[in-house]
């Protein structure tokens, strides 16, 4: 049974959309059509059920290409993704009030427009409670690969990469404590490569436009400027984007370690499987699909190969899911990265009040002020509909409901 719908304009590649029962705005479909018109698309573009209009490319899209990469499709939040760890705690181990737990996490994990004041200090790793292995990973990232990249592209070096390692950031990035269907406690967090990823993405987006020169005017959208394989800038971008993706993964490990330490400070000792699930949802990778090696850009999508574990979060007041991929080849082994926005941040701030937000997040220890209105649950698509639309892409392993949410 076909579970997707197909858009196919003359002269363009097809678009397979796993969006049955989920509303998709016209602007997002138009943006997908622009992407599908590019000559180097491999077979088709796949749209996940959380698809919505994005900057550069449609959020919730899977873009397989041969011989080229579109830097703006990867975006500037390179390597953004999720990490989740199941703990030995159960709901009965948690106090009635979780305010102290939230406050401790907010003290120990830099968030918002903040920096990690300890990251540049060589002795910081031991004092922060982060295992030495993370310090070794960062040393390799900074001293070897990052310096090599910056030798060729000095503009990248001026980013604030050091002070942003181990920090959450703003917007939809979060740290949550959740309970699963058996009342077991999980820790879940969402973040990426922070300032350095933004610098790398922005720099190569502009470089791609410059490289295209007069040909830029022939594109349906200037954000679809691309780098051709075999050129120096293509190779340099692949090197930089892979580094940023590793930075993002390391960033999540550091924050998970500090979150665990913060919780232990309040709750006492417990065990945590710190490496339970750690997956990107804004990235590019080389993969084999339909017998060909292709570059797969997942812009707000998670790899869901057969048996691969992933995380699909809801909003601040809805369920989230630990999933196992079914390896569906037609989605290029992908699934959604979350619920997906139902409206822009500006529209959400105009439509909802603080009282609306308090009502929708009742029972959850989280911020309930005007600065997080754009993240209120009703600003997102219904996660239940999103999950139903991708039943042939993933199976649900655990269903999580949050009890604490830390936002930047």
Image (cartoon, rainbow, N blue to C red):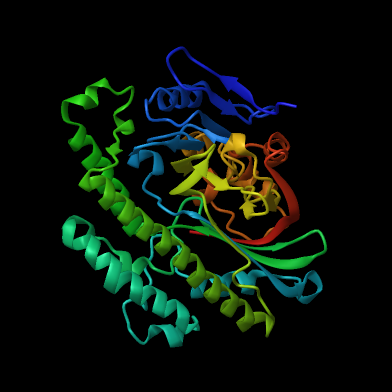
Vertical side of 221 occupied by 114: above or below: below
Q: Residue 329 placed where, x, y %?
A: 61, 38
Total residue callouts: 0
**Residue 207 visible at all:** yes
Q: Residue 177 placed where, x, y %?
A: 66, 65
Q: Which residue is drawn at 21% across and 32% down?
A: 212
Q: Please tell me in which quadrant of the rendered image residue 115 appears.
A: bottom left
**Quadrant into which the N terminus falls:** top right
In the image, 348: left or right of 240?
A: right
In the image, 142: left or right of 245?
A: left
In the image, 248: left or right of 266?
A: left
Q: Residue 167 placed where, x, y %?
A: 43, 66
- Looking at the image, which residue sits at the far top? 10
Q: Residue at x 17, y 30 (%)?
A: 213
Vertical side of 339 occupied by 278: above or below: below
In the image, 144: left or right of 247?
A: left
192 or 407: which is nearer to us? 192
Q: Residue 408 placed where, x, y %?
A: 48, 59
Vertical side of 96 occupied by 135: above or below: below
300 or 383: which is nearer to us? 300
Q: Which residue is drawn at 54% across and 37% down?
A: 290
**Residue 94 visible at all:** no
- Looking at the image, which residue sits at the far front? 291
Q: Which residue is drawn at 29% across and 66% down?
A: 145
353 or 159: which is nearer to us? 159
Vertical side of 362 occupied by 118: above or below: below
């Amino acid at each position: 049974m076909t579970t997707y719908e197909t858009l196919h304009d003359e002269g363009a590649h097809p678009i397979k959309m796993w969006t049955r029962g989920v509303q998709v705005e016209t602007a997002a479909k138009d943006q997908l059509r622009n992407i599908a018109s590019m000559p180097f698309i491999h077979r088709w573009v796949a749209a996940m059920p959380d698809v919505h209009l994005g900057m550069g490319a449609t959020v919730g899209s899977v873009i397989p290409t041969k011989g080229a990469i579109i830097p703006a499709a990867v975006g500037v939040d390179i390597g953004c993704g999720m990490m989740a760890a199941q703990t030995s705690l159960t709901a009965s181990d948690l106090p009635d009030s979780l305010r102290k737990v939230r406050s401790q996490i907010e003290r120990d994990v830099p968030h918002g427009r903040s920096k990690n004041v300890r990251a540049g200090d060589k002795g910081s790793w031991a004092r922060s409670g982060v295992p030495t292995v993370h310090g070794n990973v960062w040393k390799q990232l900074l001293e070897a690969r990052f310096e090599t990249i910056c030798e060729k592209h000095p503009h990248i070096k001026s980013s604030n990469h050091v002070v942003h390692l181990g920090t959450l950031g703003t917007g939809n990035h979060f740290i949550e404590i959740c309970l699963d269907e058996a009342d077991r406690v999980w820790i879940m967090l969402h973040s990426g490569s922070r300032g350095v990823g933004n610098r790398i993405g922005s720099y190569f987006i502009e470089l791609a436009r410059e490289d295209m020169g007069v040909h830029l005017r022939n594109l349906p959208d200037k954000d679809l400027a691309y780098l051709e394989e075999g050129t120096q800038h293509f190779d340099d971008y692949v090197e930089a984007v892979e580094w940023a993706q590793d930075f993002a993964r390391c960033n999540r490990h550091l924050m998970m370690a500090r979150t665990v330490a913060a919780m232990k400070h309040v709750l006492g000792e417990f065990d945590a499987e710190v490496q339970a699930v750690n997956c990107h949802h804004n990235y590019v990778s080389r993969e084999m699909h339909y017998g060909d090696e292709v570059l797969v850009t997942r812009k707000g999508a998670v790899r869901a190969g057969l048996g691969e574990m992933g995380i699909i979060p809801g909003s601040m007041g809805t369920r989230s899911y630990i999933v196992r991929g079914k390896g569906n080849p037609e989605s290029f082994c992908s699934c959604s990265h979350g619920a997906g926005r139902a409206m822009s941040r500006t529209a959400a701030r105009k439509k909802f009040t603080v009282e609306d937000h308090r009502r929708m997040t009742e029972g959850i220890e989280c911020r309930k002020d005007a600065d997080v209105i754009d993240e209120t649950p009703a600003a997102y698509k219904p996660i239940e509909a999103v999950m139903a639309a991708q039943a042939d892409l993933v199976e649900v392993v655990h269903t999580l409901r949050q009890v604490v949410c830390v936002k930047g």
